[in-house]
Image: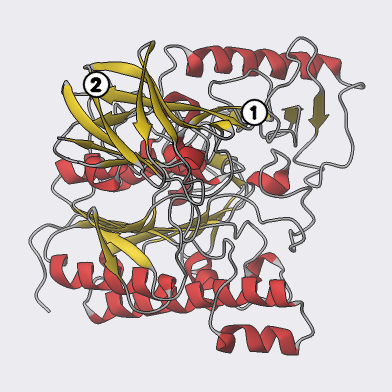
Amino acid sequence: MSKRNDDRPNVIIIITDDQGFATVSLHGDPHVRTPNMDRLANEGAECVRFYGNPLCSPTRASLMTGRYAYRTGILHTSRGGALMSADEVTAAELFSRAGYRTGIYGKWHLGDNYPMRPTDCGFQEAVWHKSGGIGQTPDKPNSYFDPLLYRQNEPFQSKGYCTDVFFDEALSFIDRNWQQPFFIYLATNAPHDPLEVEDRYTAPYKQKGLSEEIARVYGMVENIDDNIGRLMAHLDSLGLDNETIIFFLSDHGPAPGRFNAGFRSHKGNVYEGGIRVPFFIRWPHHIEAGVKIDQIAAHIDILPTLLDLCQIEIAGQLKLDGTSLRPLVEDPKSGWSERTLFIQTHRGSFPRQYHNAAAISGQYKWLSYPGRGEEWSIDTSTPEMELYQIDKDPGEQTNLSEKRPDIVQHMRQLYDDWFKDVTDGWRVGTIHIGNDAENPTTLCRYQDSEYDNIFPLGWRIRIEQEGDYKIKIKRGTLDGPGVLKVDWQGKIEQAVLKEGQEEAIFSLSVGEGRLEVWLELNEIGRVTFSSNETIGDVEILRL
């Protein structure tokens, strides 16, 4: 095949969901088979102390922007916490501006509505699923087999197993775009639950005596590994192997009950088991095989590293939190400044100081309220803090907070300064309504509504055009007569609904704020929708 004129490297980022650090055979798992993931590490560089956030969306926001998730408006994975501000500049936008073809295949989880969808954020081609996973609200009903996906922003019925479909689409993208540099974000929703995979992948693990759950997890990981092998073989067949940088990582630690290489806890928590992830970079003939980097690094470093390797310059006004790892990739013994990384993820609609937080240096790790990220409120006046000498105690077994109050205080101050910095000018993703880019707009109550504990409060939106809007609420079996109410900018309006009726027309003014839509049935009064279901979701159509 003829060589293209542009000699800049291609980029492929592969990120898995719920895999964690340990579910790779080279990291000591005695059962899982991952020869191709191992090959990425053995033929390239591995950061052995690499961190993500303990949950999906915050890690993905940091990967996409090179910035701490707090800056982007991302707090958690649902209930208003997974909407990235449209002001953020993404990797896809930067590579697109630099002349790369950009494509996403798989999971996005940074906003399902305009202007936060992949196609709004720099991806020229997109085959993706909504919400945090296939089959999760609002992606119900759906399955890992023949899943309903979105091409650009239009739904289509795919054929095959989801991971295979995503890799098939990526290979097709390569075939159509190999003559210019390309940027691919290949984000599998496996091995996240529901644990669906072909029996041929689970059978060998069940024969070893492993439980049904673990056999399915390993089968899903092995399927990903097979697809990685297929991807590398395809690149080689096109003569692109040496021209393509492959990044591989997982978003966070595994679910409870899975092998975790001796690390403490699991996804959701800021102990090592929740935030340590595998991270490999392979670029034949450019990155020496077998490089091991033991300096701390994190998701925020991926974008600056890519920009450095691909020699893409960015405007000076763009503030990145990460640092290019290129010097360490080229020489692990090169001089490297000591730094502190910060990780925080929790429920709620705004940043909360000390809530499920960690500060990590090369030697020590400070934690505040670890493992309590699912709680909706904590006492910030006297935070519960822990300290570990993480370079000697990666299992976090010996709490040194009472013995070394000086270090606790020092790292707490570093965290306080960081928290003040990243929450200054706090802004969140806002769903735009009335724009031609998306009409109608579906508002998912569980995924995108703000919540006070378990009670939904409405959606953060911007009405772009004043006028009449048809508002339809999904009622499920609650089909009795009543009224549909809309609270917009302090003005409550209502429309009578007959039995079984779901929609009415309301006049909405231009502005930004919280929109709440609810039912009041004649027999039971106001209905509060708070479950992880599509009931209570709202569709708004500009007329």
Q: What element does badge 2 sit on? A: strand
Sequence order check, earlier mark of 2 and 1: 1
Residues at discs 2 and 1 in contact (Cβ within 8 Å): no
Dot 1: element: loop
Q: On the image, numbered disc 1 is attached to which residue?
A: 453
Q: Rounded to the nearest whole Å, what is the CA distance between mark 2 and mark 1?
A: 28 Å
| Residue drawn at the location 18% of the way across and 57% of the way down | 181
Residue 492, by quadrant, is: top left
Foreground residue among 414 and 158: 158
The crowd level at tag 2 (other Cα within 10 Å; few <14, some 14-19, many 20+) is some
Nearer-the-camera pick, 347 or 419: 347
Residue occupied by mark 2: 508
Label 2 sits on what residue type?
A: Leu
Q: Position of residue 302 (x, y in %)?
A: 42, 44
Asked whether, in this view, residue 524 is left or right of residue 92, the answer is: right
Q: Is residue 75 above or below residue 228?
A: above
Residue 213 visible, this angle: yes
In this picture, residue 533 sits left or right of residue 273: left
Residue 171 pos. (x, y %): 27, 72
Instruction: Please say if 91 is above or below 410.
Output: below
Q: Nearer the viewer, mark 2 or mark 1?
A: 2
* Residue 285 at least partly seen: no
The three-letter amino acid code for the residue at tag 1 is: Asn
- Split into 4 quadrants, where in the image is the C terminus? top left
